Amino acid sequence: MAGQQLALMLNPNPNTPNALYALSLEALIGSMNTKVPALDRINRLTELPRNLLIDVYEMMSQQESLKDTLLEELAQLEVFTRLVRYSPARSKLLRIMAALMASKKMLARRLSDNYVSRYWTPGHDDDEGDELIQEPVDLDKSRDQAPLDPSPEPEPSKLHIYDGETEEDGSGASCSEQRRQFITIEVDAKALQPQSQSELSVINNSALEELPASEMQAIDMGLRLGSFLSEAGWMQESITVLECLNGRLKRLPPHKHWLEMRLDCLQRLLYAESAHCNFKLAQRTYNELIGLNRSLNSHVPAQLVAMAYTQISAMYFARNEYNHSHMWSGLAMRFLKGSASPRITIDVLRQAARACVVKRDYARANLLICQAVRRARKHFGLKHQKYGDALLDYGFFLLNVDSVFQSVNVYKEALAVRRGIFGNMNFHVAIAHEDLSYAYYVHEYSTGDFSCAQDHVDKAVNIMKNLVPSNHLMLASAKRVKALLLEEIALDKMADGMDEEDLLQQSEELHNFALLLSLEVFGEVNVQTAKHYGNLGRLYQTMNRFDEAERMHQKAIKIKTDLLGAFDYEVGLSIGHLASLYNYQMKKYREAETLYLRSIDISLRLFGHSYSGLEYDYLGLCHVYETLHDFEKYLKYANTLENWQVLRGQNLTQNKSSYPAIEEDYSITEVKIKFVSMCACKKSPVHSQSVSSVANSN
């Protein structure tokens, strides 16, 4: 029946090649059973051409009775690698893995175990081998979720980072003839220690021999399998494979392409570790990358360097260290060439855009993310994972520039793409649910209808509960959004005279869970930790626990100011929250006045007179001056508020967008020229302070 439906979809005429092909597939799948002739037929499936084999396997994945058989087929490394190397089959292979994993057929674990058991060869000086072949451990007790190393760090040292060749000037000079450029950054001294004499001597030895074919096969298999597993959302299995490969590469004798292979393996490993919030492992991988970075030269492909720097940027982004993230993404942009593959180009543009968003450099972010989305759509189509990834980052940009309605629609499309590939029970799908929930929350803030937001965050939490340990940061992130929703739902019900103390207590438990985990992983002095303090401050204000609310807001302000400076957007938000507490609950009107004026000053410096977050500051000042009977100042700010309302009304009526989508297709050279020439226009999201406070909490 499935084959007949497929045939009709391909072509209503049953005599066409497409229809006959679909019917043939149905006949083949229908003949599979446990009888001896069928088993022989199954064993010979791998003799089929790859374009036929992937279709057979995809149809098998739709038959519950054949999933065990399919698991055994695909768990064979040679079979799986043969399909992974076939680019047209990748999307189908992702769907096949999703179907098996959803049925508890643990293909990802089988593949990683098989790779490690075949290729792990512990050396005499290696102490990591046992970790790779152990049974899974709960991250409650594992190194994966240990806090960042609290031990004293060595003094930072200066390192000259290879910053790429000069731009081609049309002279025809080769890369090796062009002048190398460097920047100087501070890194941990331990990252600069030589790894081994053989590693240092191999860098510039162009006379070295190629590796044996069998070794090249093992390396290629590890790179492809590790990347596929992380792309499919099975990060821990990806880390296992790539750690195994990294150890193998370090023990190999000097050979050609040594530096490229190490760099490629480490950048893929860093992606998986950072995406899975394994920051202690990511720090170790970063240190290895820095050690290799000092030896980069013109023989290393520029696109590989660009990807390595992009993954370093992504690691810092995940750790909320935005200055470093922005710097490394800028370096990645310098290495991005027009000859880079579409995948690499899109990933570099996406990460650079994200780093620009958190630095409030929205003009550059708009340029980069629009180009990434257009390239993903053009090269991969509307149902490809790379397009879904680009959409998710575009939704992030739109939400931050107050295009909330558009952001919701983009997030919905991204979720649909990811669910179409991965099904429902998947790491990437959970992230898309959480992002969409948060966008709905902001969009519906004024209406109080959080049903859509609650539905998606519940799905995100349930998926994460099934995929990660109970103390995982990604689960905490989803729970944080749920806590925000519970608080707002409770407020609405309390306004109707209902007692919703239970909802507020649930919200407090979730916020405290997220805060404690952030303290454990990031420590006290981190933007994420400060946001959690701010969340608790707002909640305690709702719960009439004003002294505790004051302490939480003060902690948030101090940490953000120390990290970001006195005039950062985040600092302004927290100052506004504390001003509201002093004004409406604690009756500290002079303190509130000072804070409101500071918040307004920050907003005007960064965002201009039409920034909608100003509304609540102006209303707050009017309340302060009315209470203090300072009617001259009251009239002044009442008039300012009226002028603000005119500006806002004009913007809304004319549907103005500060950052409309860029429709032109630019070459990479043009993108880089525009990127460098743009002024760092720092404009803020323009939703109200009460809504902006949501942005402060996610």
Image (cartoon, helix red, strand yellow):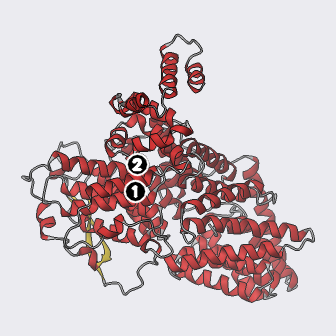
Vertical comparison of 271 with 382: above or below: below
Q: Residues within 10 Å of mark 1 (few under 14, many from 20)?
A: many
Q: Could you say where residue 59 lies in the image, as x and y percent from the top left?
A: 51, 32
| Secondary structure at numbered mark 1 | helix
Query: Which of 254/531 is in front?
Result: 254
Q: Could you say where residue 624 lies in the image, as x and y percent from the top left?
A: 82, 81
Q: Looking at the image, which residue is at 62% across and 66% down?
A: 698
What type is the residue that disc 2 sits on? Answer: Phe
Residue 399 picture quarter: bottom right
| Secondary structure at numbered mark 2 | helix
Q: Could you tell whether 107 is left or right of 643 in the image? A: left
Q: Could you tell whether 482 is left or right of 212 in the image? A: right
Residue 197 picture quarter: bottom left
Query: Which of 140/479 is in front?
Result: 140
Which residue has dot 1 on it?
238
Q: Is residue 680 visible?
A: no
Q: Looking at the image, which residue is at 49% across and 32% down?
A: 33
Query: Which of 390/103 is in front?
Result: 103
Which residue has dot 2 on it?
228
Q: Could you tell whether 498 is left or right of 312 in the image? A: right
- As measured in the structure, the alpha-carbon distance from the residue carrying label 2 to the one carrying label 1 is 8 Å
Tell me how many marks there are: 2
What type is the residue that disc 1 sits on? Answer: Ser
What is the residue that sits farthest to the left in this orientation? 207
Q: Looking at the image, which residue is at 33% across and 39% down?
A: 82
Q: Could you tell whether 523 is left or right of 281 in the image? A: right
